[in-house]
Image (spheres, coloured by chain):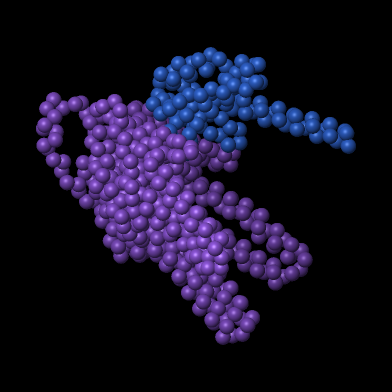
Amino acid sequence: MAPAGGVGATLVFTVGWILADLHYRAWRWGLDEHRLETRHGVIVRTTQIVPRTRVQTLTTRTGPVDRRLGLTTVVVHTAGTHTPNLVIPHVGADAVARLQRELGG
Amino acid sequence: MSDEPDWRRPHPLTIVVGIVGLVANNALPLVLLLVAGGAGLGLELIAFAVGLVTVGVGIGRWYVTRYAVTSTAVEHRSGIVNRQARTIPLDRIQQVAVAQPVIARVFGLAAVQISEASADGDVAISYLGLGPANELTATLRSLARTRDAAPPDDPVTSVSSLPPPPMVLHRTDTGDLVRYQLAVRTPGLAVGALVVVAIGVLGGASAGGGAALGGGVVGTVVVVGSVAMSAIGPIFTLGGFELSRGDRGLTVDMGLLSRRHLEVRPDRIQTVTVTSGPIARRLDLHQVVFSAAVGTAAGQGQVTHLGPAVRTDDVDHLLQRALDLESGLSTSFEPVSGLTVRRFLFRAAGAWAVTLLPWLVVTVATGALGDALIAGVLTVVWSSVAVAWARERFRRLGVAVDGDRVVFRHGVLVHRLTQLASANAQAVVVRSSWFQRRLGLADLNVSTAGVGPGHAVRIPDLPAPRAAELAAIVARTAAATRWELTR
């Protein structure tokens, strides 16, 4: 039983690592003078565009693990009822500062 | 305006309306209680006590409820135990409605419902006399307007110039409304009738031939009756529907027993949707609804009509005069990718593979050839329907995007057409699954701040570069427009 459990655990871990890596590689976000755009997803690729003038509020979230690594998750709220939020996960402090400066005003 | 708000209370008859409503809603238990009350003194005392408490609560609730209109907001205070204070800034008001449920109307009362865009929804001031209710609505409207405009140099001229009378854009013919409501429910009727009549016949057949016929008749009567009943409600709610446009923006009046009067500014409207089912189409009738940025509490389950039963020839005219939209049904659409047929058939094949295929395999393997034949026939029927449906779905899908608006046409049995101004787009999303990427396709979703049917547009299976292009066009227009839930 134990070897089977060990093999299973290794398999899960490896697959998880690969998926996480792929997801990380696929994640993009960009901010220009007109809009905020994010691209993410491995199997289902999603591009989300929020025009700058549609940003209602900006929220940041930090969990304990994020705090240790100096990361923050930024949530951009719109008034849309179908796509209310744009989530940019685990970004560094300089990115957060830039988003707050550009979108918060 | 003075600092202290001018607090008013609802009309005292509100208490009576509340009690009448409570009695009406609990008529059956009350009757039973009265009947059983003759059996002993105890029940009568309980009923009396309950009645006393109800009246007391009604009076208390009326006493603590207050409202006031200041120069900046509408204030509302309510609640005996849990006090609630609602403040709606005047420029956040999305729509104002005056509603007269049947009982209130009997007493000459009306409720004023003020909707704003937050999730807390709306404030309902109930009940006021009809005159004060209309006055309140007019006050809110004029206050909202004076906040838009600079104060006039000479206040006298703005009072003496009378606003032009509102122009009636659409009056729903009651016959059309009845036909439309029945048309919408008839498909359900057909399916329900088949099921119920079958049950009736089978149930009766086990008791003898005559009973089978009786069962069938009873089943039909039950189904027809329930369809008629379900159509009666909307006919009473929507009867006498009239849409006007004037100084107040768009106004909607409807209701035969309970009246409802709604005012909304055209620029608050987020999307417009035109719908017609298969039978309604034969009758040349469509339903036109809009979605506005009202809080989910207000918008939930409440469909806001521009026209509950509009003739085909009148639809485009209505949209143009109500909302200045150039073309509705007569828009020229570009199709989505033809590969959507393949994607649809792939999904239909998947559904077949998990339902009919196992059955087919099992019946063939066990040699139950009769059942296998049935499974085979069903497979043939399934594939023909799927192919025909996929083709029709592709034929129906159409999108028109320019700098100003997004128009999306879809629906196989029930035809739908949704329009929204690109300036109202809140977020644009382009999404493609692994399978779609293999075919070079992508979905385009445009969401607005509207609540209700058609508040977002989801366009499937566009060629991927075209989806990105349209997304950019819509986003560019939205970015260039300052959008606020005010003014």
* Number of numbered tags placed on the structure image: 0
Residue at 11% x, 37% y is B160
Counting from the top left corner in percent of width and height, residue B428 is at 45, 34
Residue at 39% x, 63% y is B232
Left-right relation of B143 to B114: left
Left-right relation of B401 to B360: left
Residue at the front extreme, as displayed? B41
Counting from the top left corner in percent of width and height, residue B162 is at 13, 40
Counting from the top left corner in percent of width and height, residue B437 is at 56, 38
Q: Quadrant of residue B157?
A: top left
The quadrant the N terminus of chain B occupies is top left
In this view, the residue in front, A75 or B379, is A75
In this view, the residue in front, B145 or B348, is B145
Residue B204, above or below A44: below
In this view, the residue in front, B146 or B50, is B50
Residue at 39% x, 36% y is B77
The quadrant the C terminus of chain B occupies is top left
Give the colour chain A carries in the figure.
blue
Q: Is residue B378 visible?
A: yes
- Tell me, by letter, which chain the rendering colours purple: B
Residue B204, above or below B236: below
Counting from the top left corner in percent of width and height, residue A70 is at 61, 15
Residue B305, above or below B257: above
Q: Quadrant of residue B179?
A: bottom left
Q: Is residue B447 visible?
A: no
In this view, the residue in front, B266 or B13, is B13
Residue at 31% x, 35% y is B7
Residue B296, above or below B254: above
